[in-house]
Image (cartoon, rainbow, N blue to C red):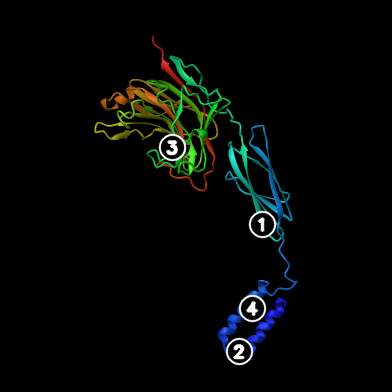
Amino acid sequence: MTGDSLYQFCLLTNYLFFKPMKNLFRLTAVACWLLMLSGCGGGDDAPDKIKPTNLTLSSDISEDGTGLVSFTATADNAAKYYFSFGDGSADLESTDGTEDHTYATSGTYSVRVVAKSTDLIGVEKSINVEVEVAISDEGYKTELTHEGYALVWNDEFTETTLNSENWKHETGGGGWGNHELEYYQAANTKVKDGYLTITAKKESAGGMSYTSSRIVSAGKKDFKYGRIDIRAILPKGQGLWPALWMLGSSIGNPPWPACGEIDIMEMIGGSGRENTVYGTPHWSDPNGNHASLNSNHEVVLSSGTFADKFHVFTIIWTDTRIDWYMDDVKFGSGINTTPSDLTEFNEKFFFIMNVAVGGDWPGSPNSSTVFPQRMVVDYVRVFQEQEG
């Protein structure tokens, strides 16, 4: 029975049997009309929809370090393909199933393609691609010598693994006192081609939703006073919190903040914030409370963000004060460390380098945050004043 015949049958049935029952007639007529529209009348004039089949998706990853990947999708009965590249970029439509995409950051990306027929019926397939993007050395550099100073220690990250004589990993989750969302693990650290890379990823580990790395020189390398240079490229994105900093080697006896903290550089990711870094000391005031110097202790780039290229973050630390520099330009007022409640800055400190995800200061990642994100460190150098 065709759709028209079914509708006529419904009308006749209502006329003969249910004419006095107007409400029931209306309901029955509506039901019959819906049946006709949905093709429930059966018959040969309700053709099947065309659906793509045999969908495949392959990738060709360029080996030149540009991050270029060529994707090819094929399917029978496909009219269009829609690619999602897994890095937060806009989806692209293709009629022939081929697309090129350039990734900005090394990482493993989940790529999805949807093939649709002329009847707009879709099928999908996903693959993972591991992309290695070469690090550009563009940006500010400092020298291995500074007038009046001697180089006493440095790590140029020229080996293939993290130097265990200089660094160790601190691992785990639990928020680290700031309600952070990452789980720190050694797997997110890479040393290659003269760079240390710490990568933050959106993946589950240790009951946390993100992973990253935190490396420290505690118990291996610590210093009192000097000029310290760290050259780095920073990550970007809401909820990212990279830091290059130092803690008093006495931490635990006394506990923080009485041990002292020197933040050489911190940045909080997010729109309008990725052009600003902060340098901050933390200590214990005469009443044993946490104290810090935040006012006018940041530097803002004239253009771009700290993810675009390398910058050098510096402190010059003496027995009377600490001053902060970015690319050899002083920023902030520095701090006079001679008051009696600032004696923690007359002791040895060790280094910490990490990329936190979430936390009280930056807030959590959101839909605009693209993972993976990386902080790249070119070198850490410690100079001390020459005598005489």
Image coordinates for residue 115, horizontal then vertical, percent: 68, 53
Residue 344 placement, left or right of 14: left
Query: In the image, residue 182 lies at what x, y percent?
Result: 46, 40
Q: Amino acid at mark 1?
A: Gly
Q: Which is closer to the viewer, label 2 or label 3?
A: 3
Residue 107 at x, y percent in the picture? 58, 38
Along the polypeptide, which appears first: circle 3 or circle 1?
1
Label 4 packing within 10 angstroms: few (<14), some (14-19), many (20+): many
Q: Earlier in the sequence, mark 2 or mark 3?
A: 2
For mark 1, what is the residue? 122
- How far apart marks 3 and 1 lie (CA) works out to 42 Å
Q: Residue furthest front?
A: 206
> Mark 2–mark 1 contact, CB under 8 Å?
no
CA gap, disc 3 and disc 4: 63 Å
For the residues bearing labels 2 and 3, Cβ distance under 8 angstroms: no
Distance in Å between CA atoms under marks 2 and 4? 16 Å
CB under 8 Å between discs 3 and 4: no
Q: Which mark is residue 188?
A: none
Q: Which mark is residue 19?
A: 2
Q: Residue at x 24, y 31 (%)?
A: 286
Could you tell whether 288 is left or right of 367 in the image? left
Q: CA distance from mark 2 to mark 3?
A: 76 Å
Q: In the displayed image of the protein, which residue is found farthest to the left?
A: 287
Disc 1 and disc 4: Cα gap in Å? 30 Å
Amino acid under disc 4: Cys
- Label 3: element kind: loop
